[in-house]
Structure formats: C-alpha cells, structure tokens
Amino acid sequence: MSLPTPERLQAWLSALESGLLERSLAVRAALLAALAGEHVLLLGPPGTAKSELARRLHRAFGGARYFERLLTRFSTPEELFGPLSLKALEDDRYERLVDGFLPTAGVAFLDEVFKANSAILNALLTLLNEREFDNGSGRQRTPLLSVVAASNEGPADEALRAFHDRFLLRVPVTPVGDDHFAALLRLDGAEPLWPVPISPDERAAVSAAATQVSLGDEAVQALAALRAWLAAQGRSLSDRRWRQWVGLLRVAAATEGRSQIDGLDLWTAPLVAADEPAQAAALAQWFQAEWLQAVPQEAPWLTRAVEAFERQLDLEMSARQDAEADDAAGKLALARQIGMGQGDDGDGMLRMVSQQLEAQLRRRYSPVHVAARVAQADELLAQLQAQRAAAAATSDALAERLRGRLWWPPALAQQVVDAHRHTEAVLAALVARLTPVRDGFAALPLDNTLNEPAPPPVQLEPA
C-alpha cells in the first residue's frame, strides 16, 4: 500500500481545522502524533475545543475505535478499562471485560488527565508507552494509535512527572483572540466534509517509509545546539524523548516526500522541549532568532550612517563662499528691496535675481572633494544593496524550503519569511534615502581651479 499523499493529508488537516479557529498548530500536532504513534497533551482552559479536536481526529483513521472519559480523583479503573468479568472470577481469574473501553480504542481522549488517582495512572503508563494492558495474569496488545489528553494546567505533583513525560507533544491552547472573535460568533456548527480515512495499510506504509528517512547533518547540529541551550537553562530531555522526537520527525519528513530530517523540522521544539506553556515562547524565540536568524532587523547602524550623510549634504549645500559672501548678501538685500511693490512682474524678477545671487553665495568645491563624497556614498550604497540582496535571497530561499511543508503551521511559516522581508524593506528604504544624497553630492557647485585634498570621511555619531 502506498503512502497517503500530501494532498490527502492536507485535506484532512483542512477538515480537522474547519470551524476550529486558531487551532492550526494543535490540529497539525494531533494528526502528526497519531501517524507517528505518539501522544498529545493539550494545555488550556475549558471551552477551547480540546475535546472536539480529539473527536474529529479518530475519523481520520479507518477502523480506529474512539474512547473518551473525564477523569477525577474519584474515577475508578472500571471506567477506563472495563468491569471485572464475573465469569472469570468464578474460575478464580481477575480479568476485565475491555471491549468498548480504553484497551480496545485506537484514538482516546482523556480530559483532566492529571486528576486521576495513582491506580489509574500506573495502568496508563504501561498502556501509553508499551501499548499493552495487564488483564488478569496476562498482558494483551492494544490497538492504540494515540491518546489526546487535556488539562487546564500542568502536573502539580512531582509523582505525575513520569506520566507527563509520556506525552511527546504538549500544545498550549488559548481562547480565540480578538482578530477572530467575530468569526467565532458567526460559526454555524456545520459538519466538515470528511475525506477518505487513512487505512491501516497506509499507516503501515508511513511507518515503513519513516525508517528510510535519514537524520541530516543540519538537523544534528540544530538538535545539538538546542541541547546546549537547554543545558544553559538548567534543563534537559531524556534519551528516550530525544529518540521519540526524531521518530516523529522521520514521519513528518516521509509524509512530505523528503528523505532527510533537516533543521527546519525543529519548529516542533516548543511542543517537545517545554515542560509548561510558559517555556514554549522562549523555545520558539530560540528557534526563530538563534537558529533561523528570522528576526526583523531595523539596521540601526546603517540608519545612523545614512542620517550622517544626509546631515553632511545639508551642511555642504548650505555653506557660503567666504570672500564673496558680504557682497552677494548686499546685492540680494538690494534686489529684494527693489522688488517690493512691483506686482507680479516684480515678484518674478525678484525670484530670478535671488536664485542667481543664492547660487553665487553657495560655496564651491573642488573636483577632488566631490569625487570623494560620491565615492563614500557609493561605498555605503554598495553595502546597503548587498545586505538588501542577501536578505531577499534568504527570504526567497526560506520560502522555497517551506513550500510543501505539510506540517508547518501557515502562520509560523509566514512569520519567519516576513521577518527577512521586513529587513529587506528596511534596507530598501535606506537605499532610497541615500541615493538622492549621493546625487546631491555629485551636484555640488564645482570650482575646477581649487586644489584641496579629499575631505575626511563622514563620521557617524555615537549610538
């Protein structure tokens, strides 16, 4: 059986996300985790569509039974694993009737998962990790693909840490923001159009293809950099968690038609390496700023350089000739006095005479001076244009690499590409400012008889 195509998986993502506003990240995490045989923890307040996502998820997998339960500290094992078999008790066997309960489910949703008591948690640990359930004297395999768990908050008790670690992906879920509030109010609750479910054979094909995906050098470097960053924060991931994460990334690559895991796959770092939602933001910042270098740059140094050139041009354009200044100023004052009361013709004549006298007042520069200023401006222009071209090339290359990335949340992809494009726009604006300055230096009044050395370079003011 062949792999489900990216187009078909995209159709499932669209169906799962239909009507679930601002849930692109959670939808992608849930479907990818289920394909990889991993579990997802949704952390957020009530009423944020966590259970709805789990109910939809099981539709994506043909033949997968669904189980759902709200856990409390009073929940009993019978609620999750089934009642005791009275017939087995008659034969001195302690067995449960598991049909229709968690041990026979393919996709399960456990709400308020950290409120369960120790008797339930201990049984869940084996079921989640080994996909096996101890029933009486024997241990039976379960068809479990993925458990979607939900909680309003993380584990408060240290004893729950081992259970918390069973969820490879931990996704913060928040209420719909202001931008989509009106759309939330207008939702009609229509049922999405469900694509053809992913069959067991297709899931097996995904698993087989994932084993052929290699771990690229770029990905190893990125994971090592993340490990060092976590160590600097006094945190770490277990060996098991690192390997589970790589397994998930192999599935992501295989379903996107890639043969290798690369550094871009670390967009999942906030979901895997954060113990609580507050840490996810710092991990996202590390990935975007430290690894992708996708941070909007305002180019303050180059901005100050352009400003310095603008000030220098203003100074040199407004400078006056020392020897002729008094005589020309007197003539200008006389022309203005004569022009008074002459009507429109007098005003026109005054403007012509004033322009001529103003030109005489302006300081003239040697060809060496003008050539030096133009060369200095050209040097800065070349630097700006080179950095602008580099920013454009980076944004285009990143956009191309992200093309066809099924699992990347679209908003995140747009954000990292836009960061480089913002930098490009800032540099383009500086080029637009400096170009007329350069032309202004080239147009300074010349005196070919002057013999003066090249002026010192334009100096930047301290930041």
Image (cartoon, grey):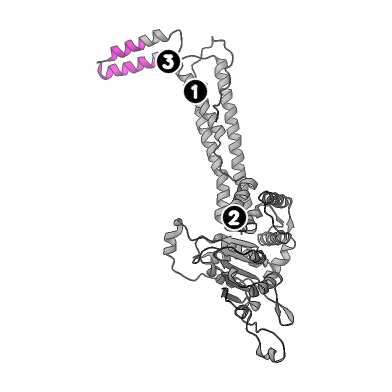
Q: Position of residue 103 (x, y in %)?
A: 66, 77
**Which residue position is annotated with label 1?**
313
Question: What is the distance, in whole Å, between disc 2 and disc 3 at their CAs?
Answer: 64 Å
- Few, some or many C-alpha atoms within 10 Å of disc 1 (few <14, some 14-19, many ≥20)? some
Kind of element beneath mark 3: helix
Vertical placement of 10 versus 389: above or below?
below
Name the one closer to the observer, 169 or 398: 169
Q: Quadrant of the N terminus?
A: bottom right
Q: Earlier in the sequence, mark 2 or mark 3?
A: 2
Q: Are marks 2 and 3 in contact (CB under 8 Å)?
A: no
Q: Residue at coordinates 72% horizontally, 91% vertically from top-left? A: 91
Q: Quadrant of the C terminus?
A: top right
Q: Earlier in the sequence, mark 3 or mark 1?
A: 1
**Which residue position is annotated with label 3?**
359
Name the one closer to the observer, 339 or 127: 127
Is 449 covered by the magenta stretch?
no
- What span is colored magenta in the figure? 331-355
| Residue type, label 2 | Ala
Question: What is the distance, in whole Å, between disc 3 and disc 1 at their CAs?
Answer: 16 Å
Kind of element beneath mark 2: helix
Viewer-nearest of labels 2 and 3?
2
Q: Position of residue 227 (x, y in %)?
A: 70, 52
Q: Earlier in the sequence, mark 1 or mark 2?
A: 2
Magenta span: helix, strand or loop, mainly? Answer: helix
Vertical placement of 307 versus 27: above or below?
above
| Residue type, label 1 | Leu
- Few, some or many C-alpha atoms within 10 Å of disc 2 (few <14, some 14-19, many ≥20)? many
The answer to whether residue 7 shows anywhere in this view is: no
| Residue type, label 3 | Ala
Q: Position of residue 354 (x, y in %)?
A: 36, 15
**Which residue position is annotated with label 2?**
280
